[in-house]
Image (spheres, grey):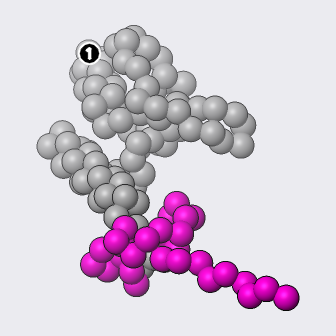
Amino acid sequence: MSKKKKQQGHYCRICGRFRANEKFGGKGHGEHVCKDCNRDIQEQKREKKRATKQAAEVGLPAPKRYPMTRYQAGSYLGITPSAFDYRRKTLELEPCGTYEGRQGTGFLFDMETIIAVYHFNQEENQEE
């Protein structure tokens, strides 16, 4: 019988790979997160903080999720998802990405799109 070869390095719980010790830095060893994945996590945190700041400047509450689906964006603005879609298409705004859900592929919207729809909604309400 041959001996079982031990895996070298550390396991990253985000990407699921065994990486060399040099690919882990600081708290990454204990948290089991490599530098590349840690960089991505930090970028996502900065992006969410940026979105929260943009929402606060307009007077909206901090978003719970970012980017948002049309259902989440509609609920966030207090309108129906179809109304959000109609206003977005009227303003000719494009989604920032896609996601795979239970019911198929859907679109994601960034804070700039949501704020533009919010302003459009405010203007529409002032006219009435």
Q: Main secondary structure of the magenta part?
A: loop
Residue placed most toward the observer, 65 or 8: 8
Q: Secondary structure at mark 1?
A: helix
Residue 97 rendering spot, x and y as whole percentages? 46, 32
Q: Relative to residue 72, is residue 124 drawn left or right?
A: left
Q: Residue furthest right?
A: 1
Residue occupied by mark 1: 127
Label 1, residues with CA under 10 Å away: few <14, some 14-19, many ≥20: few
The reply to whether residue 35 is visible in this rendering is yes
Residue placed most toward the observer, 4 or 59: 4
Quadrant including the N terminus: bottom right
Tell me if residue 100 is in the magenta stretch. Answer: no
**In this figure, what is the number of numbered marks?**
1
Dot 1 amino acid type: Glu
Q: Residue at x 36, y 54 (%)?
A: 40
Quadrant including the C terminus: top left
The answer to which quarter of the image holds residue 23 is: bottom left
Question: Image height check: is 118 above or below 120?
Answer: below
Residue 125 rendering spot, x and y as whole percentages? 30, 23
Q: Residue at x 38, y 38 (%)?
A: 77
Q: Residue furthest front?
A: 1
Q: Residue at x 50, y 38 (%)?
A: 69
Question: Image height check: is 5 above or below 35?
Answer: below
Residue placed most toward the observer, 83 or 16: 16
The residue stretch that appears in magenta: 1-30
